[in-house]
Amino acid sequence: AIYFHTVPYFVQHYIMELNTCIIRSTLHVLIICVLTSQGIADNTTSPTITTTSVVKDVPAVDDREVLLIGNVVVNYTDWLDDGCRFAQKAVEDVNSYKEMFPLFQLKLDQCVSDDNNVAGITSNLFNYICEGINTPLMFLPFTGQDSTEPLCGKWGCITFGMGDSIQYAAMNKYHSKVHAAASDCVLAFDVIIERFKWEKIGLLVFNIERSKAMASLLRQELEARGVEVGAEVIFNVDGSSPDVIWESLKDIRIFVTFAPHLGANINPRFPLQYLLCKLYKRGYYGKHHVILSYFPTVQEQWNTFDEADFECTKSQMFEVLEGALGCSLSVSTLLGKYDNERHFKTNQTYTDLKPIVRPKNTLEMRRYFQPLLYDTIWAIALGINATIHEYGVNEVKNYKFNENSTKPLLDALYGNLLDVDFQGISGHFYYNNTRGFRQFKTYIGLISSEGELSTSIGYVEVDKRKVVITQPDDVIWESKGGAAPLDQEIKQYERKRINSTAIIVLSVIAAIGILLASIYIVYAIYHRNHVIIKDEWPIMTCVIIVGCIILDLYVLIHIADIQTGVHPEPLHGDICMASTGLLIFGFTFFSGGMAKVIRETWLMFIFFWLIVADVILVSVWFVTDPMIPREKEIASTFDDDTGVRTIMVMITCESTYQTYFLIATLCYKAIVLLMGGFIVWPALFMSVKKGFVHFSEFVIAVFTSLLVSIILVVVSFLIPTETYALFIIYGCLILFTTILTTLLIFIPKATVIARGGDRLSQKLFSPIGAAFGFLETVAGEGQMPGLGGSKSMEMPSVALAAGQIE
């Protein structure tokens, strides 16, 4: 009882119907037993549950057995009624050919006049089973197949479904359709995609099981051929789908849409129209985009919706839809493809039978089922005829519903049905032997700028995977420029790179700077015993010169970039690593002699630990998070005439934790610069105050380093994408600083040595002498402030500047 109250109402209804059926049958058997025991039925045949499909009111002139075809189709619209009329006409025509069907005639139950709901339809099917109205053949409507197909699969009846969904074949091994299933359009799309050599498509799927099943089948077919599904959007029309899902279609050119119209009474938003507005809003339309649309729209749909319900106007929808290719079960009807197909036996066409249709039915799409139902009745007759030759008419006539796992008669009848092959008023009639779906040419229609199917471009024979294009490309793709659009944009990449002339010029200047620095090192070694060389702490002076060489090398290695291409390659990775390392070490060497007012031993000690810090930083950085070249898109332009998108890219050196390593580097380098500036500031101040403009090279090194560093950091943040300008600014500032420092170190020493080393030249041109020459006029007696005379004179440079030594 608890279970009974938890199941849906219509399931409760089925259980009650089944119980009633069992009770009724049991009472019937008891009555027979009572009558027999009283002798009333001694000379009569015991009544039994009706097990034949023989109709008792057959005219005497026709003694053939009458076989019943079950029908639970609800006649709730005029177009369904017209379809039923065609089916009844087919029964009459079949029965009129006695020589072709000598052993039987058919009777089709009338379409049911009832509400179109799952409970009612399933209840009607239960009545056949419970009341013993045995028939192996059953017509089913669109509604309720999730319930009716499993019932027929269990009790045993071949179904003729009117819906296009593809999942019911798994519910009933005896499932068939009166027409091709939606899967035929799926397979047709696959063949069309193959025909036009498209390798990347996007799927747009209305969020219902019917559409998702079709999309899943297409995805399987495409993946088997290696075609990429670049994006799949499953959407609702009730506002629950976020707009961000449409962004994935940005690079898609070929759209396959499964957005069937469900009827204004079911879903007034119209999925396809909703979809068209979404594409319009994002600009995913035009001559470079193609839509393959399942269930193409008809005029009925355009006339029954309100533009206020959508984000765009009807004309804008048409603009997106123009040139689309449409496929559905009704394309052949809409395009009049079987109006004049002649039946193999009656020699009639659909046009000849049109008077059956009531005049009030003007919807072209609704004509679709009329010829299909007519031909299906003929297929049933041919299948029964073949089975009778094998089993005999009585076996077929006395077929009973049963729950047996094996049903030999039904298997034979189903197999013979799938083997029929004839020309009907709906064209060539045959089934897919593995799926039970009616097969015929699946036509592809071209949708015009008014949202209507305007012409047929060809058809697909799905079972043969054959596409026949009946129109030339300039007709099919007239709205697309006369040729099939490509499945992807033609992308042309241009790299925003450093001008080759600028690289060569700066590289030549860098080479000159390296040459000058090297000459000084050789010159200093040669004159290492001269007082002007020894006095200037030659080791730390050479450290500064080596820093100049390293920074010049940073500029020079960019000449390798001339040979590289548009996209990142291994050489770019080498340049990234080398340039980063050269900048870090070059800065340290360059500012290594910045504090010459400190004893040389202490200065070398400080420099050593700066180098150790650089080695640790670079090692950890390059080992754990190496710099790699990345391509960065900075701009793009699209030529609508050629369909070419030109993308401007630049190659940058990046790593995952690059920001953190840069912050650490800049912080400790800034501390070094500030300390150096603080130490040398007094010497610079006093030198300028007393007119000694030839101040020490180490002062130049510190303050030019400080100035250049600040400028480079600021510029890199201001114009991060201007590769050419950045290199010019970086290169010019670095070369100016390094060459100027080299000359300020080299020229004074060379001048003093060239003049013979006289005391005046040493005082004027020696960097230390210039920096501390104020001792003669300010400190008096050769004293350094705060040291006193005796301690000051212990410094050779001070003693020389004060004239106390030669």
Image: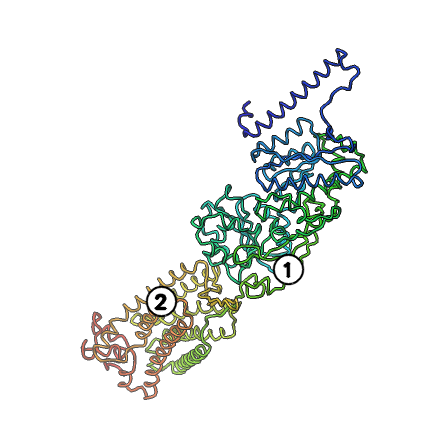
Kindly give the residue lying farthest to the bottom in the view shown: 755
Q: Residue 292 falls in which quadrant of the image?
A: bottom right
User: Is 730 on the left-hand or right-hand side of 30?
Assistant: left
Is residue 508 visible to the viewer in this orientation of the structure? Answer: yes
Q: Residue 611 falls in which quadrant of the image?
A: bottom left
* Above-or-below relation of 534 to 186: below
Checking the image for residue 195, the label placed there is 1
Q: Nearer the viewer, residue 362 or 299?
A: 362
For the residues labelled 1 and 2, the Cα–Cα distance comes to: 51 Å
Marks 1, 2: nearer the viewer? 1
Checking the image for residue 718, the label placed there is 2
The x and y percentages for residue 147 are: 61, 34
* Above-or-below relation of 653 to 350: below
The x and y percentages for residue 472 are: 63, 64
Mark 2, residues whose alpha carbon is within 10 Å: few (<14), some, or many (≥20)? few
Mark 1, residues whose alpha carbon is within 10 Å: few (<14), some, or many (≥20)? few
